[in-house]
Image (cartoon, rainbow, N blue to C red):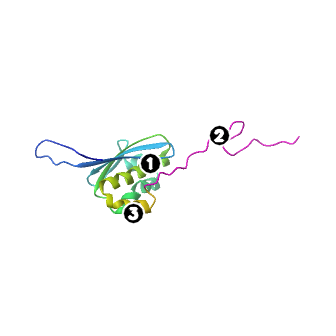
Amino acid sequence: MAVTRRGNEGKQTRQRWYATGRRKEAAARVHLIEGTGRIFINGREMEDYLARPILSMVVRQPLDLVERNDKFDIKATVRGGGVSGQAGAVRHGIARALTLAEPELRASLKAAGMLTRDARAKERQKYGQRGARARFQFSKR
């Protein structure tokens, strides 16, 4: 969904696209805005929010793939999960927003697996056991 901002007369309007990304327990609301390539997560610069450089790389993957690093600013709000799940959720949201902004990018993003929600999540602990798969130690006597 493209939203055009109406400003005062003489002000330049910038288009925005919105998409939701999810990974594990994390959900990200991603706003893609025509701009210079700055990425903000929960109001902070991406490098400040994501401690590990590999997570910053994960977030930038869709932009690197379609070579749109300097074309869009990204503002994301993420809730739930840990930092790794949040980075994956933002990546998913960016990829989905890019397909709204430029539908011809869908094929390359889809082929790279960026549009598929990663369904892997933590398996629940079973009752009477130590964990999802782990058991209490068996004692014959």
Q: CA distance from mark 2 to mark 1?
A: 24 Å
- Within 10 Å of disc 2 (Cα), the crowding (few <14, some 14-19, many 20+) is few
Q: CA distance from mark 3 to mark 2?
A: 38 Å
- The residue under the point 50% across, 52% down is 118
Specify whether residue 131 is painted magenta: yes
Residue bearing mark 2: 125
Q: Earlier in the sequence, mark 3 or mark 2?
A: 3
- Within 10 Å of disc 3 (Cα), the crowding (few <14, some 14-19, many 20+) is some
Contact between labelled residues 3 and 1, with CB atoms less than 8 Å apart: no
Going by the numbered disc 1, the residue's amino acid type is Ala
* Kind of element beneath mark 3: helix
Residue bearing mark 1: 89
* Kind of element beneath mark 2: loop
Can you tell which of label 1 and label 3 is closer to the viewer?
Answer: 3
- Percent position of residue 9, x then y: 10, 43
Q: Say whether residue 85 is left or right of residue 43.
A: right
Q: Which residues are magenta?
A: 115-141
- In this rendered view, identify the residue nearer to me: 92 or 54: 92
Residue bearing mark 3: 108
Q: Say whether residue 28 is left or right of residue 9.
A: right
- The residue under the point 46% across, 59% down is 113
Can you tell which of label 3 and label 2 is closer to the viewer?
Answer: 3
